[in-house]
Image (tube, rainbow, N blue to C red):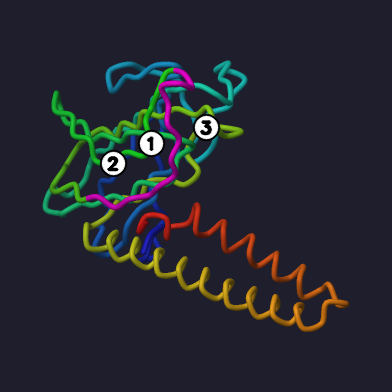
């Protein structure tokens, strides 16, 4: 589980750095990488520049940074103090609306996930929603770099937040979330279909139709943007 299975308050990133010294993934659980990340507006870059400080999760809209809802940028988080004996894994969340995620260690860059195509304008960018689970191996100190763009939604940025933990932990969490979404979608479909049948038998009563449409709308939303979408 995430957010401190042992009851310990999980650490948060401060000024672009997340110090995990003293955090035991086996005992304390996996960890949401929340807090203050470095952000570079209209730059496809990586570690090395200071950048602005923004909160994750959240939109990149910020009056101080003069950002806009459409555009591109790079988020950077330094992670240190990890027990190098731990076999790490990470869940990449949904990000509006295209991204590439890298692990950077020294001069070595490794792409671990992507969704859609990041672009510096609308023609170059291809939107896509997806969350993934990826093994990272043993890492004591590294940078997490997320290059993203948005030209198709009302704001860009992190909808969710990356989750770091033991590889086996995050795989279980990710699979559980998928099954949760498919179960919920199945229940909504059955209830919606049942009330549609009731309406077709008694068309004077509109309430079953409205409730069926309500269930159908949530069913479609889960199929399109939930963890279930990662199976398609």
For the record, the magenta segment spans 121-134
Is there a contact, CB below 8 Å, between mark 1 and mark 3?
Answer: no
- Residue at (14% x, 28% y) in the render: 108
Q: Position of residue 87 (x, y in %)?
A: 15, 54
**On the image, numbered disc 3 is attached to which residue?**
156
Q: What number is the disc on residue 113?
A: 2
Disc ID at residue 169:
none
Q: Secondary structure at mark 1?
A: loop
Q: Nearer the viewer, mark 1 or mark 3?
A: 1
- What element does badge 3 sit on? loop
Placement of 223 over or under 141, stated as above or below: below
Circle 3 Cα neighbour tier, 10 Å, few/some/many (<14 / 14–19 / ≥20)? many
Q: Mark 1 or mark 2, which is nearer to you? A: 1
Q: Is residue 218 left or right of residue 5?
A: right
Earlier along the polypeptide chain: callout 3 or callout 2? Answer: 2
Label 1: which residue? 116
Dominant secondary-structure state across the stretch colored magenta: loop
Q: Residues within 10 Å of mark 1 (few under 14, many from 20)?
A: some
Disc 2 residue crowd, few under 14, some 14–19, many 20+, Cα 10 Å: some
Q: Earlier in the sequence, mark 1 or mark 3?
A: 1
Quadrant placement of the C terminus = bottom left
Q: Nearer the viewer, residue 221 or 64?
A: 221
């Amino acid at each position: 589980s995430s957010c401190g299975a042992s009851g310990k308050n999980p650490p948060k990133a401060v000024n672009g750095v997340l110090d995990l010294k003293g955090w035991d993934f086996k005992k304390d659980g996996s960890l949401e990488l929340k807090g203050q990340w470095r952000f570079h507006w209209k730059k496809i870059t990586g570690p090395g520049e200071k950048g602005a400080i923004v909160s994750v999760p959240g939109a990149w809209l910020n009056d101080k940074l003069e950002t806009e809802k459409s555009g591109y940028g790079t988020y950077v988080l330094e992670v240190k103090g990890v027990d190098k004996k731990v076999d790490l894994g990470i869940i990449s969340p949904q990000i509006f609306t295209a991204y590439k995620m890298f692990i950077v260690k020294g001069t070595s860059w490794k792409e671990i996930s992507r969704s859609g195509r990041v672009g510096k304008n609308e023609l170059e960018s291809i939107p896509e929603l997806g969350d993934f689970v990826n093994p990272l191996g043993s890492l004591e100190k590294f940078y997490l770099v997320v290059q993203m763009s948005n030209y198709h939604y009302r704001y860009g940025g992190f909808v969710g937040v990356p989750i770091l933990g033991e590889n086996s932990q995050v795989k279980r969490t990710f699979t559980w979330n998928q099954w949760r979404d498919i179960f919920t979608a199945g229940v909504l479909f059955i209830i919606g279909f049942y009330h549609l049948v009731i309406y077709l038998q008694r068309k004077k009563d509109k309430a079953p139709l409205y409730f069926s449409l309500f269930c159908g709308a949530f069913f479609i939303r889960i199929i399109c943007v939930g963890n279930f979408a990662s199976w398609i």
